[in-house]
Image (cartoon, rainbow, N blue to C red):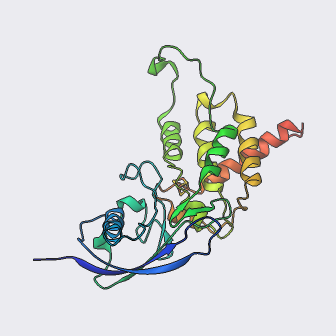
């Protein structure tokens, strides 16, 4: 028996960054067990069979780790379920006959390349500005040489869970990257390895974020709600603290 779902798709098609894009209608019949990306693969197979251009979208690991597969599904980055990336969304979460709107992450700092693929290299530039640590290369250090409490290790790990997908930017009405930047700054600020560049890191990453056209924090917490890794807005409070104390130190003002 065929249990396939019959769905109507409205997919954003845009041939290049400067072209005018539009939603294009497609009908798909897909297994409820297929992932959202597998559903798009099937759509593309059909398009290619009919000599039509496939829909361009990004994906890599397809297990919620790499952060490349972001798209907006029915108005929400990564779709209707919480704490999963697009690749972890399965078609059984949609109803037979449902219409699904699929569009790219939209933000000034993430220009559209083609269809659903956007250029998120702005995130790489923010990381290059300060998202690194100084290490002595050589043989691996003994794990017990740097004792770190369980609470600190857990908090640092929670911040480090950010996969750089950009959903926080796409959902923010200001296109702010504060959740992303704050997660990166916090993961280093909590650990001894992050101390050497701690001050310049916060200043440089925030300055780069502003330079690249990301907006200010909207304080709506939409970023936390849509983040596939559940990164908390508490990281933003930590970033504000890091940034202010770095500014005070660099301008010789007492905090
Ligand atoms: S903070 Fe969350 S939504 Fe933003 S880039 Fe990281 S994983 Fe994606």
The answer to whether residue 255 is visible is no
Seen at 55% across and 68% down, the residue is: 15
In the rendering, at what x and y percent does residue 38 appear?
31, 63
Q: Residue furthest bottom?
A: 97
| Front-most of residues 164 and 191 | 164
Image point 25% across, 78% down: which residue?
5
Farthest residue, direction front? 51
Outermost residue on the right side: it is 252
| Residue, far left | 1
**Residue toward you, 236 or 132:** 132
In the picture provided, is 76 more to the left or to the right than 199?
A: left
Above-or-below relation of 222 to 239: below
Residue 199 in the image: state x and y as whole percent. Answer: 74, 36
In the image, residue 107 above or below residue 152: below
Residue 57 is left or right of residue 168, and the answer is left
Percent of width and height locating residue 94 = 32, 77
Q: In the image, what residue occupies the spot 53% across and 40% down?
A: 156
Q: Position of residue 16 (x, y in %)?
A: 59, 65
**Left or right: where 16 falls relative to 230:** right
């Amino acid at each position: 028996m065929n249990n396939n779902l019959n769905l109507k798709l409205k997919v954003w098609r845009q041939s290049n960054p400067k072209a005018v894009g539009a939603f294009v209608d497609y009908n798909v019949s897909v297994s409820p067990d297929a992932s959202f990306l597998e559903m798009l693969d099937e759509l593309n197979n059909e398009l290619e069979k009919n000599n039509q251009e496939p829909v361009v979208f990004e994906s890599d690991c397809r297990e919620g780790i790499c952060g490349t597969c972001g798209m907006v599904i029915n108005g929400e980055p990564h779709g209707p379920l919480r704490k999963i990336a697009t690749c972890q969304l399965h078609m059984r979460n949609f109803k037979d006959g449902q219409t699904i709107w699929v569009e790219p992450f939209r933000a000034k700092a993430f220009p559209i390349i083609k269809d659903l693929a956007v250029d998120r290299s702005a995130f790489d530039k923010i990381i290059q500005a300060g998202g690194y640590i100084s290490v002595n290369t050589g043989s691996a250090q003994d794990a017990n040489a740097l004792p770190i409490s369980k609470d600190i290790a857990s908090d640092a790990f929670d911040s480090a869970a950010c996969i750089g997908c950009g959903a926080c930017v796409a959902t923010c009405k200001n296109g702010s990257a504060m959740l992303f930047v704050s997660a990166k700054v916090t993961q280093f600020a909590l650990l001894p390895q992050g101390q050497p560049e701690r001050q310049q890191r916060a200043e440089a990453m925030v300055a780069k974020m502003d330079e690249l056209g990301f907006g200010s924090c909207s304080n709506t917490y939409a970023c936390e709600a849509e983040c596939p890794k559940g990164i908390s807005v508490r990281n933003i409070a930590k970033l504000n603290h890091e940034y202010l104390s770095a500014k005070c130190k660099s301008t010789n003002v007492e905090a």
